Image: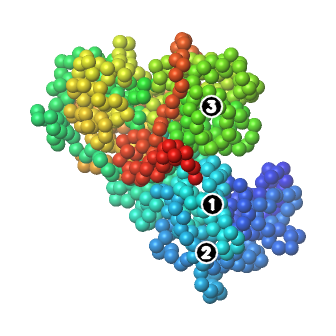
Amino acid sequence: MPKLTIDGIEIEVEAGTSVLQACEALGIEVPRFCYHERLSVAGNCRMCLVDMERAPKPVASCCMPVGEGMVIRTDTERVRKARNGVMEFLLINHPLDCPICDQGGECDLQDQAVAYGKNTSRYDENKRAVKNKEFGPLIKTVMTRCIHCTRCIRFAEEIAGVPVLGATYRGENMEVGTYVEKTLDSELSGNLVDICPVGALTSKPYAFHARPWELRKFESIDAMDAVGSNIRVDVRGGQVMRVLPRLNEAVNEEWISDKTRHAVDGLMKRRLDKPYVRGADGKLKAASWDEAFAAIAKRVAGLDGSKIGAIAGNQADAESMLLLKELMQSLGVASIDCRQDGAKLDATTRAGYLFNTTIAGIEQADAVLLIGTNPRKEAAIINARLRKRWTMGGFPVGVIGPQIDLTYDHSYLGAGPQSLEALLKGEGEFAAKLKAAQRPMIIVGMGALTRADGAQVLAAARQLAEQVGAVAEGWNGFNVLHTAAARVGGLDLGLVPAAGGRDVAGILDGADKGEVEVVYLLGADEIDASRLGKAFVIYQGHHGDVGAHHADVILPGAAYTEKEGTYVNTEGRVQRGRKAAFAPGDAREDWAILRALSAHLAKTLPYDDLASVRRRLVEVNPAFAHVDDVAPSAWGAFGAAGAMDAAPFVTAIDNFYQTCAISRASATMAECTEAFVKGRQEEGKTGTHG
């Protein structure tokens, strides 16, 4: 490890470290525009110049590797003069429109112009102007502000895997854009706004809505998918204005998906803000909480538990699912389920429904097999991590299921279970690659597990994992990729049918036949509500979506940004979301609604505050004690032996942008659906591309 001296301080760093990284390790600030720690080094802004002993002129610290005995000075007169000059050149053509720029207050160029620039300019000629580009509904462009740092080009190619951006022309005429005019079709495109150091790329839905100093900031957890991305929720008044990523190396690094970032405008649309009860005329009418609870108590009174069913939705927090389960148990109800999509997963073996490798552990794997999953749509952040590992080399990828674009090369092995059976027999080139790998991964998606033979597919995947050595001492390469934020938490709490109980399909079938008379929907909107028949439906949720349309009683709940909630992501990591805004009107937090309802049903639950509920969570499953950590899970038997159906696997998500009540209420997500999903379908029909 080479030793060098920076500003009189000796430091020892790993070989290959850049001078800029060594300066950061000492806490010495070096200005930069083009450098980003997760992107390749471009070295083209020259803002990070430092003095190196015996060098004839300042060197760019971002692309200068450290050397033994190197002496670096970061604050000499020559360095200051060089940085002044670079800043003067950058501002030659940059427009003076900070008062109307959405980047104002969060702009690297503003900050560094104050710290390293001059207070005058010697440039008298006209500034250049560049035509704005059309990148789609999410990215607003003002390309005259662009300083050619090329961060966006490198992000699109290296992280997102969509190499559509580039630079055309040279010198002062250089422009960043797509070579052929087209929108930027990536599930991660919103991150371009975060990495742009100026106001060239800003958020189109957020444009001119707020300034950063007007916002209150809350650290929370995303509930749009099962990744559990760490986010920052920015609020003004009672409204969520935007969502930004929060650094967590173990989960989402510093990226979030476009749905996580932009679906939040749906939080203010189609909201349920007061209880409703369906009257004798068949119409829903506003009611008080007591009237709504009384209507439920009247209908449930004296009803046998076998005639009641409960379904937990995809964004339910662990606290509310715990109270739902205990309330149903007090009523003698065995028919309760958290698997809206009918996934054939049971709660007996935790390792059988987790992403055991962990998200960060993907970088340690050396082969992966995807079964019935499209991670690009189901978990865009995990797909980015898979691509990151693929770019390192030595990472063969195999796919069983629909033919998809994953943003990285892969071997297509077939459409259905026959290909899985062939791998079990050791047939094919990819079977040999899996067997030869030291740390192979198998990822099973909901497209394979929501079928009638999902339990058999799960058992076959487990057998393959054991056969190729994916489960060994210190390594578990068997993974289930969930699509619902509430799914792992629900399974951890045992929200599956008890003995003699019905699952989701059974509850709906029973309601259709009149055998189930009362159905409790806890934010459950992803069901075939037409099969609820004449059942008395209680819907507790935050949006007037599918469940609310069929409800006889509506109990308005809080969305994930409006309550303190515990969520368990697909890898089994327990995380806590924070309350960033108040729920509208009379809406309340979900656990409090269930606690109040239990009192009206004369089955009072013993919880008076959130802390007591969370203590009970730990009693039910010790995994909830490991907040912000992944609790170890023992390997065991799961799935069911038997023949698999020959039908091909299908994707669990057709439209990435609209998967829940919030995203369906979002105008931005509707625009993305129109631009990307329907646009892609039209291209497929006509056979045109580009």
Quadrant of the rendered image containing residue 285: top left
Q: Are marks 2 and 1 in contact (CB under 8 Å)?
A: no
Name the secondary structure under disc 1. loop
Q: Residue furthest front?
A: 686
Which circle marks residue 94 in the picture?
none
Point out residue 331 in the picture as x, y percentages from the top left corner. 27, 20
Q: Residue furthest left?
A: 280
Which circle marks residue 113 in the picture?
2
Which circle marks residue 179 in the picture?
1
Q: Nearer the viewer, residue 164 or 625?
A: 164
Q: Residue at x 47, y 23 (%)?
A: 451
Point out residue 582 in the picture as x, y percentages from the top left corner. 33, 50
Q: Residue at x 75, y 37 (%)?
A: 394
Residue on which disc 3 sits: 399
Residue kind at label 1, given as amino acid type: Tyr
Residue kind at label 3, given as amino acid type: Val
Point out residue 6 in the picture as x, y percentages from the top left corner. 78, 64
Name the secondary structure under disc 3. strand
- Report the Cα–Cα distance between label 3 and label 2: 49 Å
In terms of sequence position, does the residue under pointer 3 or pointer 1 come before the other?
1
**Location of residue 103 with respect to 457 vertically, above or below:** below
Q: Residues within 10 Å of mark 2 (few under 14, many from 20)?
A: some
Point out residue 93 in the picture as x, y percentages from the top left corner. 61, 78
**Does residue 551 appear anywhere in the picture?**
yes
Q: Are marks 3 and 1 in contact (CB under 8 Å)?
A: no
